[in-house]
Amino acid sequence: MGFPGQAGFGKVTSGSLEGSNVDVASELTEMIQAQRSYTANSKVFQTGADLMDVLINLKR
C-alpha cells in the first residue's frame, strides 16, 4: 500500500488517456477457449452423472 508519486508507485495524472498494453484479440480468444473448455468439462461431468444414475437404477 502506498500513495501515488512515492518510490515504487506510479503517479496520477488528471485529464490524460491511459495507454493499454492488452491485446484485445488474444484476450478474447483465450476467453472463448476457456468457455469452450468449461462447457466440454461440464458435459463430461453430466454424462458421468447420467451413467451413474443408470447403473444405480439397474441395480434396483
Image (tube, rainbow, N blue to C red):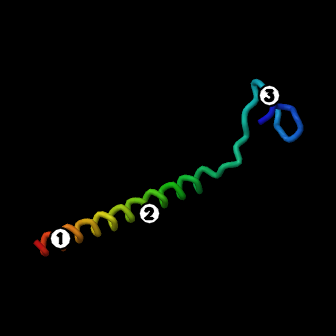
User: Residue sitting at 80 percent across and 28 percent down?
Assistant: 13
Q: How far across and down, in percent of the image, does residue 22 sit?
A: 66, 49
Q: Earlier in the sequence, mark 1 or mark 3?
A: 3
Q: Count residues near mark 2 (Cα–Cα under 10 Å), then give few for <14, some for 14-19, many for 20+.
A: few
Q: Count residues near mark 1 (Cα–Cα under 10 Å), then give few for <14, some for 14-19, many for 20+.
A: few
Q: Secondary structure at mark 2?
A: helix
Q: Secondary structure at mark 1?
A: helix
Between residue 46 and residue 29, name the one nearer to us. Answer: 46
Between residue 43 and residue 56, name the one nearer to us. Answer: 56
Q: How far across and down, in percent of the image, does residue 7 sit?
A: 89, 38
Please tell me whether mark 2 or mark 3 is closer to you in this view. 2
Between residue 13 and residue 46, name the one nearer to us. Answer: 46
Which residue is tagged 1? 56
Q: Amino acid at mark 1?
A: Ile
Q: Is residue 6 left or right of residue 31?
A: right
Q: How far across and down, in percent of the image, does residue 53 sit?
A: 20, 67
Q: Is residue 60 left or right of residue 24?
A: left
User: Residue sitting at 38 percent across and 64 percent down?
Assistant: 40
- Residue 37 is tagged as 2
Query: Spatial distance from mark 2 to mark 3, Cα to Cα?
Result: 41 Å
Which residue is tagged 3? 13
Do callouts 2 and 3 mark residues in contact (Cβ within 8 Å)? no
Q: Is residue 28 left or right of residue 1?
A: left
Q: Amino acid at mark 3?
A: Thr
Q: How many marks?
A: 3
Query: Spatial distance from mark 2 to mark 1, Cα to Cα?
Result: 29 Å
In the rendered image, the residue lying farthest to the left is 60
Q: Amino acid at mark 2?
A: Ser
Please tell me whether mark 2 or mark 1 is closer to you in this view. 1
Please tell me whether mark 1 or mark 3 is closer to you in this view. 1
